[in-house]
Amino acid sequence: MEWIKLRSLRSTRWVLLGGMAATVALGVVAGFNTRSVTGDPTSNVLAGIILGQVITGVLGVLVMTSEYSSGLIRVTFAAMPRRGLVLAAKAFVFGTVCLVAGEIAVFASFLGGMAALRSSVPHPSLGDPAVLRAVLMTGAYLALTGLAGLGIGAILRHGAAAVGVLVGGLFVLPLIAGAASHAVGPFMPELIAGNSLAAVKPVSGFTWSPWLELAIVAAYSAALLAAGGWLLIRRDA
Amino acid sequence: MISVRGLTKSYGGTQAVDDLTFDIHPGCVTGFLGPNGSGKSTTMRLLLGLDEPTRGSALIDGAPYAALRWPLRSVGAVLEARAFHPGRTARQHLLALAAASALPRRRVGEVLAAVGLSDAADRRAGGFSLGMGQRLGLAAALLGDPGVLLLDEPVNGLDPAGVRWIRDLIKSLAAQGRTVFVSSHLISEMALTADRLLVIGGGRLLADTTVGALTARGGGSLEEGFFGLTEGVR
């Protein structure tokens, strides 16, 4: 049911494709602008995910909240009273699509960005395991943001509010928390993505293993989905 | 068959539904009549497991809704008009529901034909008129060929042709031996459609009777019979 729902909405398809294209475009521009010889070209050309994560996160929100705004949720729960299973199905279908789309977008960003790099700047290659790791993890990050959006949507049930929380959590929270202490950096998903997952050269303040950082992001998404699922089951439809 | 025993639902301080007990039998149209806010929609949502009752039980063929293996094959419900995503076509909406209940794809074509939406099947549902939206809702309810039908205010907003079409459909479904439970606040339409009547007011069951009996009580007018029952009930 959830797969048919996801693929039958033209708007989802176009937003996802548009988001992928924008991510790649930003990556190419960032690659073109990379001048520093000592910097991290890989993490630069993956910068497009700043936008990409908003796209996948918002789509995740809408996968859930559009059912509430249209009233479809009652039909869905009448067809499938096991609400945890409904959320799990949405997460599986949407997460998989985001993962595939995300990986395609970041690989394209990397290749496009590499092509745009000046010859004076070192060109990383996918043969380097650290580079491959950075690209793969960044694609996974896009899927995790999508799932986080789905979880927030299930918790709040209201599209605009959920998008607000998503964007606030991704971009505003690190600013506020960072004003208090720089030690919170490794816990903020958006900063994790740029400074650890996508980074080949270590960044000061982000010394933990990227695998640990990816696990932290995954934990956030899992917790949001779990909370969303618990609320879906407990609350009246 | 629907069996409700001591069904109660409170939201905060208000009793939306208060100690309802009744049975609804197959083969006839049972009307659920009551003023706005009397608890009709809440009762239907409790029957479908969309809300949790505070007390009491609402069983369909002896089991709670959540225990049904393929709910859409047992119960078809239309609770509100246009409960679909405007961006999908009618066909896709029904295909998704059919997939949820392991129903064959040809059922989608069959119910679309049954409600007269075959020509509009591949148009985005957002462009449907209210009448077409109601038809789509009914198509979804009929998808699993269920033995029980719950319809909440199905004729709201419909033009006379639509009203008559739904009335005829409801009566034919009951004549096929299904259990049909229709709520409405339109007394004249109820008089034409229903056989048995449950009258609800302020969340409480005021009468479990027939159209004929309540009309007789009202001296030949169902409306009078209804107002006689619900006068002063809040």
Image (tube, coloured by chain):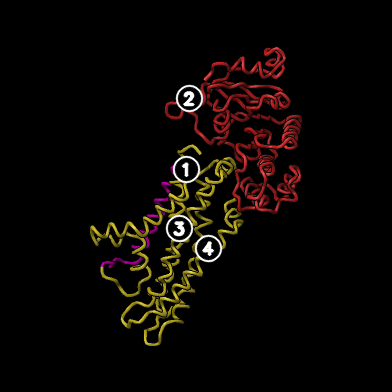
Chain colours: A yellow, B red
Q: Is residue B193 magenta?
A: no
Q: Mark 2 highlights which residue? A: B15
Marks 1 and 2 sit apart, C-alpha to C-alpha, by: 23 Å
Residue type marked 3: Gly
Closer to us: mark 4 or mark 1? 4
Q: Residue furthest bottom?
A: A119
Q: Mark 1 highlights which residue? A: A232
Q: Are marks 4 and 3 on the same chain?
A: yes
Say whether residue A181 is left or right of residue B105: left
Q: Residues within 10 Å of mark 2 (few under 14, many from 20)?
A: some
Q: Mark 4 highlights which residue? A: A16
Q: Compared to B45, does A159 lie above or below?
A: below
Marks 4 and 1 sit apart, C-alpha to C-alpha, by: 26 Å
Q: Mark 3 highlights which residue? A: A57
Q: In which chain is the residue bearing label 4?
A: A
* Residue at 67 percent of width and 45 percent of height: B129
